[in-house]
């Protein structure tokens, strides 16, 4: 792999991190958000410092041959810990238990990082190796143990992540399950990276030469594994947000029939709220619900409880369930009241009965059912024809 093969994933991680930093600035106490930022930072650092040009530059700047080796190993170990901590915070649970498990993973991998530094300091690596450090120094005292330790720590994290994500994916649905399965796929590539690296190192211990596995096969597996895993963490968050946004717009559109119906009852000269095209969908839904409730108040004197009861009975007779029948009855009463209000332009009828207002026990959900009934229910259409006659 060339330097570009490392720098492109690093740039992708940096872009993702740039999008997350503003949220961290406003909500830095959120442990899940901090875990995501830590993972993206460490993933980008691993790719950036593992690139051969960067390895050569760091060795030259420090004046220590192969100084990049323990640096990259420590970054990989820290990245493994960040994945485990993110998974703990993502899954949730009692806050104290989550913090305790996270601290244990951080402490354990911090000990591994210290051990890597100590082992490198005790060993000797006089000849610079940019691509095959693992196999070239596999039999060197202390350095060989350092290589085995970082591979073992990475392998443990990969196995734990596969097990945790697989088990969790069997308990959930939707985008979260999709994301977990993507993470599992990514970590299978990481397990392949561990297998090829370990095979090459063990082969060196036994006097054989499988260096090609470590030099040419393992790096692409690690790159693919990291990118796929990062996608698995991002997909549920992004897709769930898009899904929520789509659902909000769908709610806004579904309320349109009821909103248009009650607008007819608004008194002449009633000011309307004008919203800019960039106004958030949530605010539009709130404004539309407010307009509908105001319309109910204006229609209050014209609501007919007897007509609503008749419409309810007809809906039940047609096989509607309790909630649907109630929505159909309210929709029929609203449609009749709108026409009664139109027939009384001077507003001679006064007073209103609060008990006759359309049901709103479930808030927006009842409004959605009433709006749907206005568009689809044959009972409501029959009432409209009856009132027109």
Image (cartoon, rainbow, N blue to C red):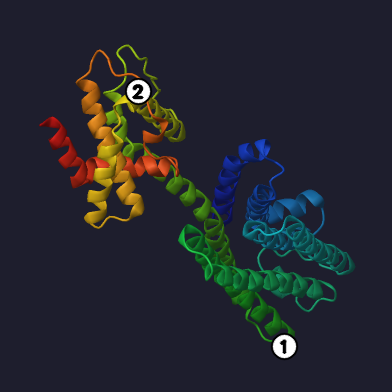
Disc 2 to disc 1, how far (Cα)? 89 Å
Name the residue at the left extreme.
Answer: 389
Residue 341 screen position, x and y as percent: 25, 23
Closer to us: 334 or 96: 334
Left or right, 44 with respect to 345, comes to right
Residue 213 vertical placement versus 83 (above, below) = below
In the rendered structure, which disc, 2 or 1, sits on the residue that comes first in sequence? 1
Q: What is the count of numbered marks?
A: 2
Residue 344 vertical placement versus 375 (above, below) = above
Q: Can residue 112 be seen in this snapshot?
A: yes
Residue 48 screen position, x and y as percent: 64, 52
Residue 85 vertical placement versus 255 (above, below) = below
Closer to us: 253 or 136: 253
Residue 76 screen position, x and y as percent: 70, 61
Which one is closest to the eye, mark 2 or mark 1?
Answer: 2
Q: Point out which mark residue 206 bears.
A: 1
Q: Give the residue drawn at x 86%, y 68%.
A: 119
Left or right, 224 with respect to 257, comes to right
Q: Give the residue drawn at x 58%, y 61%.
A: 226
Residue 364 occupies quadrant: top left
- Give the structural element (helix, strand or loop) at label 2: helix
Q: Which residue is label 2 attached to?
A: 298
């Amino acid at each position: 792999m060339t330097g570009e093969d490392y720098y492109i994933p690093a740039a992708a991680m940096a872009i993702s991190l740039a999008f997350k930093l503003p949220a961290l600035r406003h909500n830095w106490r959120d442990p899940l958000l901090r875990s995501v930022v830590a993972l993206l930072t460490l993933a980008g650092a691993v790719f950036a410092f593992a690139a051969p040009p960067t390895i050569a530059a760091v060795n030259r700047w420090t004046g220590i041959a192969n100084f990049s080796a323990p640096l990259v190993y420590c970054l990989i170990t820290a990245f493994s810990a960040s994945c485990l901590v993110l998974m703990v915070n993502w899954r949730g649970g009692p806050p104290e238990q989550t913090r305790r498990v996270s601290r244990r993973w951080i402490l354990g991998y911090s000990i591994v990082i210290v051990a890597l530094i100590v082992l490198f300091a005790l060993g000797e690596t006089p000849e610079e190796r940019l691509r095959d450090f693992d196999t070239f120094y596999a039999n060197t005292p202390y350095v060989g143990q350092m290589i085995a330790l970082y591979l073992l720590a990475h392998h443990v994290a990969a196995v734990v992540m596969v097990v945790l994500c697989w088990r969790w994916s069997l308990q959930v649905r939707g985008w979260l399950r999709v994301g977990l399965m993507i993470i599992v796929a990514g970590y299978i590539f990481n397990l392949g990276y561990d297998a090829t690296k370990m095979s090459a190192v063990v082969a060196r211990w036994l006097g054989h030469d499988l260096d090609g596995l470590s030099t040419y096969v393992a790096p692409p597996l690690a790159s693919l594994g990291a990118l796929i895993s990062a996608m698995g963490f991002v997909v549920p968050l992004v897709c769930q947000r898009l899904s929520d946004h789509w659902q909000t717009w769908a709610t806004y559109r579904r309320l349109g029939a009821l909103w248009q119906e009650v607008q007819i009852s608004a008194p002449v000269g009633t000011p309307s709220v004008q919203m800019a095209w960039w106004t958030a969908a949530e605010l539009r839904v709130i404004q539309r619900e407010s307009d509908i409730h105001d319309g109910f108040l204006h229609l209050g004197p014209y609501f007919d409880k007897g007509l609503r009861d008749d419409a309810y009975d007809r809906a039940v007779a047609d096989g509607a369930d309790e909630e649907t029948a109630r929505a159909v009855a309210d929709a029929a009463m609203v449609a009749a009241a709108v026409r009664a209000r139109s027939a009384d332009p001077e507003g001679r009828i006064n007073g209103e009965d609060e008990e006759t207002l359309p049901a709103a026990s479930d808030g927006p959900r009842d409004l959605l059912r009433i709006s749907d009934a206005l568009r689809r229910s044959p009972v409501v259409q029959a009432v409209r024809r009856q009132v027109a006659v």
